[in-house]
Image: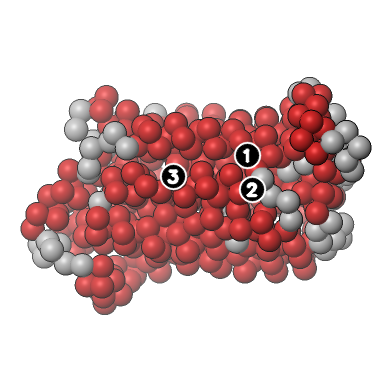
Amino acid sequence: MAKSSSLKSTLAVSLNNYLDAGAIVAGASGVTLWQNYLGLSEMHLGWLNALSANALGAAIGAIIGGFLADKFGRKFIFTYNLLVYMTGVLIVMLAMNFPMLLAGFLITGISVGIGVPASWTYISESSEVNNRGRNICISQMSWGVGPMVILFFGMLLAPGGFLYAPVESLAQAVVGADAPQASIQVFSSRVVFLTLFIVAFIAWNLQRQLEESAEFTANKAKDKSGIVENIKLLFTNRIAVKTVAFLATIYLTWNLVASVMGFFMPHIYETAGGLSNEDANMLSCISWVFVVVTTFIISFFVDKVAHRFFYIFGLAAALTAWILIIGGGVSTIGGIWLFTILWGINNGSSVQVFYALWGSELFPAKFRAGAQGLLFFIVRGLSAVWGLVFTFIYGDNGEGFTLAAYCMVVLLLIALIVGLLGMPNTRGKTLHQITKERYGDDY
């Protein structure tokens, strides 16, 4: 595949990452508004996080979508999956009660999970050997642009925001001028979800036009094994099992921190930092600016410089952020700003970049997407449980924030140590070469 072609397909598929992170942050940016509108408790918020694109919803979708992508093709997922996403977003937009809101979050999350293994697999299989890391970084940039744009809209549309007046007028026209204030204010979140619906429609039309992965087509021509056979191979091959354990450990420990930050960051700013909803969304948006800029810079070097350097760099930024917060607290504006910048740098050179890269490199084509789906299921599923536990640790008003911060430091240290011990050497090698080195000629 020509370089321009691989870049074009990468951009089209990377919109899935925009929609993944966008769905998480769209919920986060308006979570206080939904809480006021529906009278939700912290436990309700925990369930929204647990069943959303941030955790269990994506986990369920990933383990289904991964093996479907290995059986029917990557293009099969791109043809139908975003229709499910648009359905979930539409339900959230129209939600009038907690069960409806929860159902919308769950359906959207399932769609996100279905799309992720196919997306990372397709990008890796469609890339040239010296551009694979770059293309994964482009996908990661989309994961940063999504929250940045969504939080920007959330900031403008939030009560008191620059564009809140037309939102308020729309809400009054729909629910009546004498409706409770919370019913009117929540329309800013409904409009934010509308933007996701529009992007999903555009992405669906672009992805339906993509050609099937050449590596998938070649593998299917010689290998007729089904989903059950591939699952058995994944769980019985010693190298595959060790690879799953390694990738699951580094991604889980980092994602337990990132998933909390992705959903609760604005809420933490509001409750522990005492900021307004508008200011909380502004700071979260600025953090994602640093994500995009950092990833953009790294994309020029990731195929040329040892992965170890960027891996350490990202986790060092994350650890420094949390250690500084433990020492200074988020009650000071300086501490909040420093934390915001460092966390953004971490996300730009994050474990997720290398998890996506290595996850698409270290498994053979016959169960490549399925293995990633399994990994995503493990990580997002446990993140769902952690999201519920975190609400107890954190407390209703952030009184347990220091204890939560210590938990984050321990998790990040595990990701750093295990990653350095098990880091593979795949840079500059073709997927076929990597597969042959690890699994022999039978795969």
Residue occupied by mark 3? 82
Answer whether labels 1 and 2 touch (C-beta < 8 Å).
yes
Give the amino acid type for the residue marked by disc 3 in the picture. Leu
Is residue 172 visible to us here?
Answer: yes
Q: Quadrant of residue 23?
A: top right
Looking at the rendering, in which quadrant would you find the C terminus? bottom left
Name the image quarter holding the N terminus.
Answer: top left
State left or right for residue 123 relative to residue 376.
left
**Percent x, y for residue 220?**
14, 55
Q: Is residue 252 left or right of residue 337?
A: left
**Disc 1 on helix, strand or loop?**
helix
Compare marks 1 and 2 and give the one earlier in the sequence: 2
Q: Disc 3 to disc 1, how far (Cα)?
A: 14 Å
Marks 1 and 2, how far apart in space? 7 Å
Give above or below for 374 relative to 325.
below
Residue 413 % position (x, y): 58, 60
The residue under label 1 is 193
Q: Which residue is mark 2?
A: 92
The amino acid sitting under disc 2 is Val
**In this picture, is 95 found above or below 173?**
below
Q: Amino acid at mark 1?
A: Phe
User: Closer to the N terminus: mark 3 or mark 1?
Assistant: 3
Residue 120, how many percent across, how many down?
Answer: 36, 47
SS type, badge 3: helix
Q: Residues within 10 Å of mark 1 (few under 14, many from 20)?
A: many
- Residue depicted at 76% across the width and 29% down the height: 170
Q: Residues within 10 Å of mark 2 (few under 14, many from 20)?
A: many
* Residue plotted at (38% across, 33% down): 205
